[in-house]
Amino acid sequence: MEINNNDDISHKCDKKSDNLRYIKDVSELPHRILEWINMNSDGVFILADTDGKLLYVTTAIEKIIGYKVSELIGTYWYERIPIKDVEYVRKQVREYPGDKKNVNINVLNNDGKYILLDCKFEQYVDGADTYILAYLKDITYKKETEEMMVRSEKMTIAGQLAAGIAHEIRNPLTSLKGFLQLLQAGVSHKEEYFHVMIDEIDKIEAITSELLFISKPLTENRRKESVEQMIEDVIVLLQPQAKLKNIELVVQQPIHGEIYCDRSQIKQVLINLVKNAIEAMDTVGKITLSVNCNHESVDVSIADEGNGIPDDILHKLGEPFFTTKQSGTGLGLLISKQILDSHNATLKIKQNTIKGSTFQLGFLNKVFD
């Protein structure tokens, strides 16, 4: 039995022909309409060759950086971009070839000022020719808005911190004033009063010392560091304090991985967390430090066998002067979070199934720019 596919072939040819006519019609839209579309677009479309020469730029570029299209065609994309941003873009291309990229770059406008643009780009292959397609969008206003929100948040935190400092320091000062008045009145048992007064002064000193640490600008002395070596240093430092409470510090092997960080700062975070774990345990037990390293992240976990942290106060940890310890200031965890934020790292706190809590630090497994 013979099957005739001529009708099917004819139908497909007609459909293809319709598509071609449609594409032709769109490409031949009046120049005025294309101009209107370009000028009312939020972003700019760019076509460049593999050398970076601009072959096509939509007219929306004029309202973003002020240059006319005729001034840009034939120039190279990197001519109006800081060398640091150029190197970053090229690094993205080298490390992730063939993938779609999304980066923020600064572009020099015709007033001699840099504006921040969001840039999406990818390679486009047309037969033997390869091109770069890019879409640019001005995010200067968005960035300024975000910075204003951050400044507002900082002012709120500063106010909370100031109120906390006033409260925490006023209490020991009130005690000191009272004891001085008693001594001035000539009461006996002066040695007992002196002992209490020294304790109150020590508390004020501890608060001011931690506040000074917060006020210090974080250094940029960063390089690849061995997680195992940092943990060993912390164990050596805190082992004597743990032994006084019959607590065993256990390092779960094997430990692999390196992180790009300021060694002294991350050690400070580890010391704060292990010290907190020791102080949280009232009975004999162990504190386990473990590391999980994969392609995406390096996670450091510190698990104790203390009483755990009630769910209703978990969200308060890290607030200035909030602490579950009798002699704590609540600034240690605040400082730790500040350091981790500067390293693009995370801190997760969770209750253990049986008893105690686990503090997990998460570091991206790559070199930060």
Image (spheres, rainbow, N blue to C red):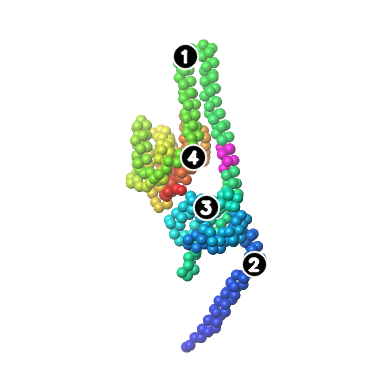
Amino acid found under the numbered disc labelled 2: His
Q: Name the foreground residue: 44 vs 331.
A: 44
Q: Between marks 2 and 1, how big is the CA–CA gap?
A: 97 Å
Q: Position of residue 159 (x, y in %)?
A: 58, 34
The residue singled out by tag 4 in the image is 338
Q: Position of residue 145 (x, y in %)?
A: 60, 46
235 lies left or right of 84: left
Which of discs 1 and 4 lies nearer the camera? The answer is 4
Q: Between marks 3 and 4, how big is the CA–CA gap?
A: 32 Å
Residue 352 visible in rendering: no
Which of discs 2 and 4 lies nearer the camera? The answer is 2
Q: Between marks 1 and 3, how big is the CA–CA gap?
A: 74 Å
Which of discs 2 and 1 lies nearer the camera? The answer is 2
Residue 189: image tag:
1
**In the image, residue 153 lies in the stretch drawn in magenta:** yes
Q: Are marks 1 and 3 in contact (CB under 8 Å)?
A: no
Q: Earlier in the sequence, mark 2 or mark 4?
A: 2
Residue farthest along the left direction in this orientation: 254
Q: Secondary structure at mark 4?
A: helix
Q: Name the foreground residue: 361 vs 36.
A: 36
Residue 252: image tag:
none
Amino acid found under the numbered disc labelled 4: Gln
Q: Earlier in the sequence, mark 3 or mark 4?
A: 3
Q: Are marks 2 and 1 in contact (CB under 8 Å)?
A: no
Q: Earlier in the sequence, mark 2 or mark 3?
A: 2
Amino acid found under the numbered disc labelled 1: His
The residue singled out by tag 3 in the image is 81
Q: Residues in magenta? A: 150-157
